[in-house]
Image: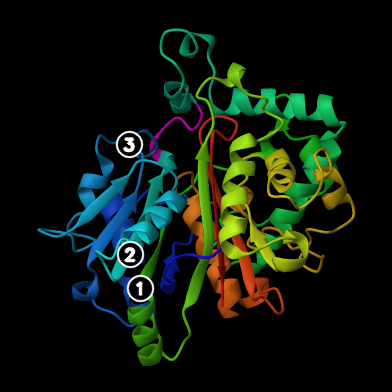
Amino acid sequence: MGLSEKVGVVGLAQSKYGLKLNQTIPEIAYDVVTRVLDDAGLSIHDIENVVSSSVDLWDGATASGAFLTEVVGAVMGSETRVADDGILAAFHATLNILSGNFDVVLVLAHCKGSMGAHYDITNWVFDPVYQQKLGLDYLSSAGLQASWYMSKYGLSEEQFAKVSVKNHKNAFNNPYAYQPMNISVDDVLNSDMLSYPIKSLDAAPISDGACALILASEKRAKEIARDKGREPIWIKGLGNCYDSHYLGDRDLTECSALTIATKKAYELAGIDDPVKEIDVAEISEPFSYQELLWSEGLGFCERGGGGKLIDNGVTEMDGELPVNPSGGMLAGNPYIVAGLTRLVEAVEQCWGEAGDRQVSGVETALAHGTTGPSGQMHCVIIVGR
């Protein structure tokens, strides 16, 4: 079917992720904004609209996005703020361009996870009358999802651990990753239990950072590319979907919202067989088991088949469909920033500029982001030449 008009990525930048205790949020964001402008060969005056993504609770500040108006050059200009994962900021920016109102849009996501109690603050996401009092948060709800997944489809803790081993190993090739590690399946299984069956090495660490990209309309993207000497990478398809807020109202093993978002993105991109037509996938996985579960929702295998993907080496760097050659969230991308980082990584793969983490021959890449307990929201973006 395809998009009505082409939207291209013309520049990108990301932080070296980690605990940035001596940097403020504006300082972290400013570094990325200046570098993304340089990468695209543009000045701040070329930017017609800014879409930024942040969530106050993660940053430990009320209206944390309010600090950034000067940083992104939006004083007396056009700025939109998205209180959700950064991939939705890119989704929103794409629609802004398709609307015909803007030709060049800066997309920014930032998070300072070190400012808050990592999981405790996510208790606030739940219904305040009934569910907050139960102590539910992202971690405990993930434990429920992982346990149900294992029970329903027979997956094992060892298969989850293999995801962590793979992604921490991949992170050695990524200069932006926070925690590259040589670990074994036993190391993961013997790490501290957080919420059964999730161990500490099954979970993404606390980290800080930001990432950014610049989107442009087809005409403007080609002009920027000509000046820069680098072809744009085009948004081929995209989709997003939210599931019910209440965990009890959905089957946590079916990731229905992801299935719907994926179908929309694939239809627009003209993808019928994702394993054969997608060259690399960057999936947001706050917990190791989710890379397997989300792979099922993305149509990479049948329901319950995520474990076979990791067992058979399908998702390794040299596998049939490499997943998270960057190391993914498990290597240290912050919440909120993670989804936009997946998109930045996917674009770098298409440009062939991913350095030691580059997968050979990438023409089409998938980026995925998620927020909410047990994957309440999912967004999928397909990019390619």
Specify which label sits upstream in the sequence, 1 or 3. 3
Q: CA distance from mark 2 to mark 3?
A: 27 Å
| Disc 1 to disc 3, C-alpha distance | 31 Å
Q: Verify whether residue 116 appears in magenta.
A: yes
The quadrant in which residue 56 appears is top left
Give the crowd class for mark 2: few <14, some 14-19, many >=20 residues within 10 Å: many
Hey, what amino acid is under mark 2? Ile
Q: Earlier in the sequence, mark 2 or mark 3?
A: 3
Which three-letter amino acid code belongs to the residue tagged 3? Asp
Q: Circle 1 is placed at which residue position?
A: 217
- Are the two marked residues, 2 and 1, in contact with CB atoms closer than 8 angstroms? yes
Looking at the image, residue 23 sits to the left or right of residue 120; the answer is left
Q: As displayed, is residue 230 above or below residue 163?
A: below
User: In the rendered view of the protein, which quadrant contains the N terminus?
Assistant: bottom right
User: 149 or 278: nearer the eye?
Assistant: 278
**Residue at image point 57% right, 51% down:** 264
The residue wearing badge 2 is 97
For discs 1 and 3, the disc positioned in front in the rendered view: 1
Residue segment shown in magenta: 115-119
Give the Cα separation between the discs numbered 2 and 1.
6 Å
Q: Residue at the spot x=66%, y=68% of the render?
A: 173
Between discs 2 and 1, the one toward the N terminus: 2
The residue at which mark 3 appears reads as 56
> SS for tag 1?
strand
In the image, residue 77 lies in the stretch drawn in magenta: no
Q: Position of residue 25 (x, y in %)?
A: 30, 50
